Amino acid sequence: MTAQDTLVDTSAAATTLVAYQFRDDADVIDFARQHVGDQHPAFAQATLLQVEEIGDGNINYVYRVCTPDHSASVIVKQGLPWVRIIGESWPLSLVRVRIEAETLAFEAECAADLVPALYHFDDARSAIVMEDIGDHRNLRHAFIDREPLPMLGQHMGRFLAATLYRSSDLALDAHDKKVRIARFINPDQCKITEDLFFFDPFCDHERNSINPALRPDAEALWSDQQLKVEVAELKLRFLSAPEALLHGDLHAGSIFVRDDSTKIIDPEFAFFGPAGFDIGSWMAGLWLAACAHTELEAGANNAYIEQLCAHATTSWETFSALYHAQALTTDDASFAAAGVAERCLQRMLSDAIGYAGCELVRRTLGLAHVLELESIEDGEVRARAERRALALGRELILDRHTLTNMAAIDVVIRRHLAS
Ligand code: ADP
Ligand code: MG
């Protein structure tokens, strides 16, 4: 997640050992060797291996097992029955590790080039072995450095179209779909989202982290009753609309990039929910970065802000074209009727805009913020960028049913970014 992202006190990390936990580097190396095999011959044949702990997320342990010259490597990720940086006072079901592994496998069926390859999942040790995508950078850093990333919008649109269509009722047999919904029930992870995404930021909650200069804006938002009703409706859909298998935590910290390649990691929040949730989470990530760039070296970044807005439009256009083309191939006669695909896309867009609005608000007022905004050191200057995110978020939530196409949405985004 995102409980992971930033601004969480790490002083109380757990010290208790769990029986299945990796004891030392040799244990991690043995585990990796045992489970990689001919999926990565260069790694399997390496005589000398070393381990680096590289996890910068908050929830799990992530190790890179590699040759000393880094010519061959794999990643081992292990979950303990609690949040790593908090400890036993925040228990978290281990079902998340199996769900992450099974989601990675499903995503690879949909778009193998856009996720790390899964080599192995071990239930007894709550651990995953996967491809090392260390030749990619975290998208948050790429955003701060204003990397153009020409393929980003197309890649994300394709990822969303493939995963959200192929796990939907249009693509799956109705029986199979219900079995899958059950397999991906993920209550502990969903509860984190239900609280941190839909509840805390809309009230004066102790978990919130608010720039003092933004306090009056937060208080105004908390007294907005109409907004609370709309957020409640979005939360109800999140709880009760198992449309598709979501990644569930599609923020920029879960996306790694090169100029020519994009990799999406960390689907431990996956569950069957409203498809617009992933689309909106992703687009809000672009708009949060755009808000940050209105104040990061103010004025110098207009061209990059344009690119970020264009990524959102390209993502949606790619997504909707690919989703539409797939929807026309449905085997279910009810869904083959003319106009069904369009209706689905319309609903996904209005949901996406609503969830994007929630993401903009919660990354401004909630527990976990984004690096792009946090990297603005002066609180007053940061507040100007955060105020744009907050006002944009509010408008998207309230107007999601009348903003029925990407061009209209783009006008709203640009008005706030220029405010
Ligand atoms: P958590 O579940 O704790 O949030 P993540 O899956 O986000 O953990 O991983 C934490 C960090 O570990 C990532 O930000 C990235 O730097 C690194 N990482 C995770 N998976 C891989 C991978 N397959 N290849 C390279 N680095 C990875
Ligand atoms: Mg993470």
Image: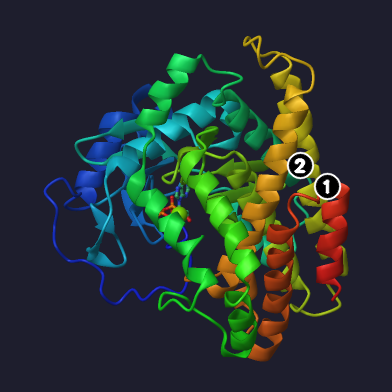
Res 113 quadrant in image: top right
Q: Residue type at mark 2: give it.
A: Trp
Which residue is outermost to the left?
A: 19
Give SS at disc 1: helix
Which label belongs to residue 157? none
Task: Name the quadrant where ligand 2 sits.
Answer: bottom left
Q: Characterize the local packing of mark 2: few (<14), some (14-19) or many (20 or more) Cα atoms within 10 angstroms.
A: many
199 or 312: which is nearer to us?
199
Q: CA distance from mark 2 to mark 1?
A: 7 Å
Left or right: 390 as drawn, with respect to 64: right
In the image shown, does 38 or 222 lie closer to the viewer? 222
Q: Is residue 363 left or right of residue 383?
A: left
Question: Label 1 is placed on what type of residue?
Answer: Met
- Residue 179 lies in what quarter of the image? top left
Give left or right: position of 105 versus 303: left
**Quadrant in the picture for the N terminus:** bottom left
Residue 383 x %, y %: 67, 83
Q: Which residue is mark 2?
A: 316
Left or right: 396, with 37 as reference point: right
Local packing at callout 1 (Cα closer than 10 Å; few below 14, some 14-19, many 20+) is: some
Question: Pointer 1: what residue?
Answer: 406
**Cβ–Cβ under 8 Å for marks 2 and 1:** yes
Whether residue 370 is visible here, answered yes or no, is no
The quarter of the picture where the C terminus appears is bottom right
